[in-house]
Image: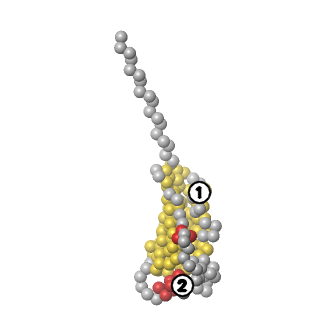
Amino acid sequence: MRRSPLIVALAALAGAGPVAAVARPLGAAPRDDPGEALRMSADRLDLDVEARVAILTGHVKLARGPLSLSCPRVDVRYDQVPHVTWAKGSGGVVAEVKGVHAEAPEVEIDLAARTMELRGGVRLTRGDGWITAERASIDVATAKVTMSDVKGSIPLPPAPLPPAPLPKPSP
């Protein structure tokens, strides 16, 4: 019989050390595609089973498919199954989605919709380009980004050099 990761996390609360859990339905076997599970790790997990909320603190890392995220604190809501449905990271968030690097004071993630909303002064980088904005929404599946109040720098390819002059014919 498989144990629920949240039950394992509850048991881990009684001991010392970091907590790591994978959220999936009670009794469900691991999927062949590990990108669909929400992988979590933190120094501490505080769990309220009746309220269906959890708070992860200290070196928090979340990953699901193309999304990886790290920050000092993540608040999580889950349903009865328990599927994690929503997460809010705070304290300085660093996220990666399909080659897009994002930094912001906070992020809110809707796991069902596979979207994330970064707020409070966002900086996105990809390669040598960067963009800042007050807020940014990222579709995790497609890496499509929507931003407001935008400023940035996007590198252009170097201009081609003019052709070398032809040598003059000798007399």
Q: Looking at the rendering, in which quadrant would you find the C terminus?
A: top left
Q: Is residue 62 above or below residue 10?
A: above
What amino acid is found at the position of numbered circle 2 in the picture?
Arg
Could you tell me which residue is drawn at 56 percent across and 79 percent down?
29
The amino acid pointed to by label 1 is Val
Q: Identify the coloring.
A: secondary structure
131, 70: nearer the viewer: 70
- Tell me the residue at 50%/81% (across/down): 45
Q: Position of residue 136 (x, y in %)?
A: 58, 59
Q: Is 167 located above or below residue 89 in the figure?
A: above
Above or below: residue 123 compared with residue 153: below
Q: Callout 1: few (<14), some (14-19), or many (20+) C-alpha neighbours within 10 Å?
A: some
Q: Of circles 1 and 2, which is in front?
A: 2
* Quarter where residue 36 is shown: bottom right
> How far separated are the C-alphas under marks 1 and 2?
38 Å
Looking at the image, which is closer to me, 71 or 141? 141
Which residue sits furthest top?
Answer: 171
Dividing the picture into quadrants, the one containing residue 15 is bottom left
- Quadrant containing the N terminus is bottom right
